[in-house]
Each structure stands twice: as C-alpha cells, then as structure tokens.
Amino acid sequence: MKRSLWGLVFVCALAACKRQVAPTGPAAYARIDTHMHIDPNAVDRTVALMNRWGIAGAVNLSGMYPGPPRHALETQLEAAAKSGGRIAVFATPAIMPILRQFPTTYGEEMAKQLAEAKRLGAIGLKITKGLGLGYPAADGQSLLAVDDPGLDQLFAAAGELGMPVAIHTGDPQAFWEKPDEANERLDELIAHPQWSLYGEPVPSWQQLFDAFERRVARHPKTTFIGVHFGNAPEEPKKVAAMLDKYPNYYIDTAARVPAIGKHAADEMRAFFLKYQDRILFATDTGVGETQADMMYGSNGAHPPTAADEERFFTATYRYFETQDKQFEHPSAIQGRWKIDGLGLPEAVLRKLYFDNAARVLKWRPRPAKG
C-alpha cells in the first residue's frame, strides 16, 4: 500500500514537472498587442492592464491624423510617450476632410499627411472599415472603394516611408445575413442593431474582400496587415491563399479567436504552424478612462466588467497555449459555441506573441520598469 501511494505521488510530481516545461498564462511570454484602441487620458489604465496580462508593448490604432484643427495625432503621441516606450501609435488619414478640400488630388494630399504623421512619431497607417463601407466618394454618388485608384499614392507612400498598413475591410459575414435565430452573431446584432448590413445599399462581403485583395496586390513594396484574421476568419482558405500569394501580407488575430475557434483545432493549428512568421498577436482591446469605457473584443448591451476582462484574456491565451477542449471563448457576445485550444509550440508562440510584430513594425517596446 505504501509503495502504491508513493508511486502515485511520484507520477503526480512528474506530471507537474512536465506541465512546467511549457508554461502558460500572462507571465509566460512577452507579448506585443498590435491592435488596441487607447484613449489618450487612459495611458495609466492601459499600462496597468498590460502589466496584468503580460503585454510588453501595445500599438494604438486610434492615432487619428495631425492637426490643425484637432491635433489628435499629436495628443495621442504625447499620451503614448507617458508609457515609457511601451505604446506605439498608428495614424489614420483624414479621408473625409481631404476629399472635400481636394476632390481630385486627395491621394497626394493624404500621402503628404502620412509623411507628416511619420515625422511626428507614428509608426504605421490604419485604414478603417469606413473605406468601402461608409466614406462617400468625391462624386457624392457612391462609396469610396477600397481599391479606388485615387488612393494609390497614399498606399505607395506607406511603403516608401516604411510604415505598415493595418487595414480593416468589411465586417463579419454574418452582418450581411438576416438577424434572426439562424444568425451566429445574433446576440451582437441585438445589442448593436446598427451593425447589421442586411438589405443595406453596401457592397457584398465578397466584393469588399476582392477589392481588398486588389489593393494588396497593387502595392508589393508596401507591408499590409489584414486585421481581424485577414478580414476573413470565417474562411481560412481565403486567408491562406493571400498569404501564399503576397509576401508583403500579414494578418493579426484581433477580436477573432471566437470566429477562428469555430474551425477544427487541428486545422487551425496547421495554419498557425505553416504561417508562423506571418501572424501577429492582437486583441482589439479598447481602453477608456473607466471600466465602463473598456472594450474586450466586442461589447454587449451592458458595460463590461472585470470578469469580462478575466474571461477575455484567459481564454485568448488558453486558445493559443493549451490543448484544452470545449471551453468558453473570449467574447460571449460573439457567438454561442465553445472552442478547443491549439497548443502551439513554444517557438511558434514566441513568434506570434512578440517576434513577428517586432520585425514587421520595426519597433520593440522598452522593458517594463520593475
């Protein structure tokens, strides 16, 4: 009996040692979150969140554009400087103001504005889903297309300036479908009915994705980051095809662990292994001045809580780092299913979490102060 008991203790201890070989959780890896939205008055809250969840550096994609009159980019850069080198900022072009003022030379003017943004300290360019879905074209009769030739100078300038382009095109495919019980994003659309594109006079999801690919193909010297898992988490084969075809193309994981978690774990694990040098860790966390102003991937009808934060980051890391089965995905509002973990190798996790971003962005956050 004693021998059996001690044998059991030994087996349990050995299992514990094996688990420690591949540590998981916030402190196990340095991470760069390449997709956050940070209020300039919330830098202290952002750094505290980063410290809680093992995020060494954060990229604020809400940098806006240089002033006058708003001086939004300058404000964001000044705020980021208070982080001690742990927050970097992407600029967003002043598309509508420039279109109104320069209806024929808007691409050239946006390129000039981007050069000024870099001079001020921005490290990249963010293009929102308004391009293709919301911004009216100069003629006022149609929407400004993702592959509009008038914008060529802007995207070419990004390449010449060495500024990666984080581009959001379209939305989840379910937003084009009828918002009924058959819609996998129904909870999200109930909370945000204005997000539904069902029956709206906008391009189809496929039309937008095709224009997005044409944009990437047109600028081989510009680095593109297709946010939200290449803007197509529902169809990893489309994402893979673009990664195979365009060496200047990368993707991030922002707010799409629930969507990619719907696919078989072995298939997604193979995807991450094959494209381990082309995927950037990202969350789409929004940080505001109060807890009620936070966003963890996507928000519902009620203000997010500390428990939502715990679920969001814990489930995200669990998906990448473990082979756990059928656990709650990071954002309850994004779908009523459970996911299986990928259990990525440590070397791949280090690329996903940090190394790929440092290389693509040409930026390394300064170490956190002890």
Image (cartoon, grey):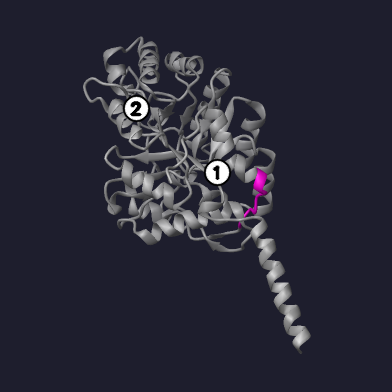
**Visible residue check, residue 22:** yes
Q: Which residues are magenta?
A: 341-347
* Numbered mark located on residue 340 in the image: none
Residue 38 occupies quadrant: top left
What residue occupies the far bottom of the structure in this picture?
A: 1
| Left/right of residue 73 with respect to residue 241 in the rendered view | left
| Element on which disc 1 rests | loop
Dot 2: within a 10 Å radius of its alpha carbon, few (fewer than 14), some, or many (20 or more) residues?
some
Q: Which residue is mark 1?
A: 233
Is 350 above or below relative to 182? above
Residue ID at (61%, 34%): 278
Badge 2 amino acid = Tyr
Residue 360 in the magenta stretch? The answer is no
Badge 1 amino acid = Pro
What residue occupies the far left of the structure in this picture?
A: 69
Is 26 above or below relative to 16? above
Residue 343 in the magenta stretch? The answer is yes
Residue 148 occupies quadrant: top left
Dot 1: within a 10 Å radius of its alpha carbon, few (fewer than 14), some, or many (20 or more) residues?
many
Is 216 above or below relative to 185? above
Residue ID at (33%, 47%): 45
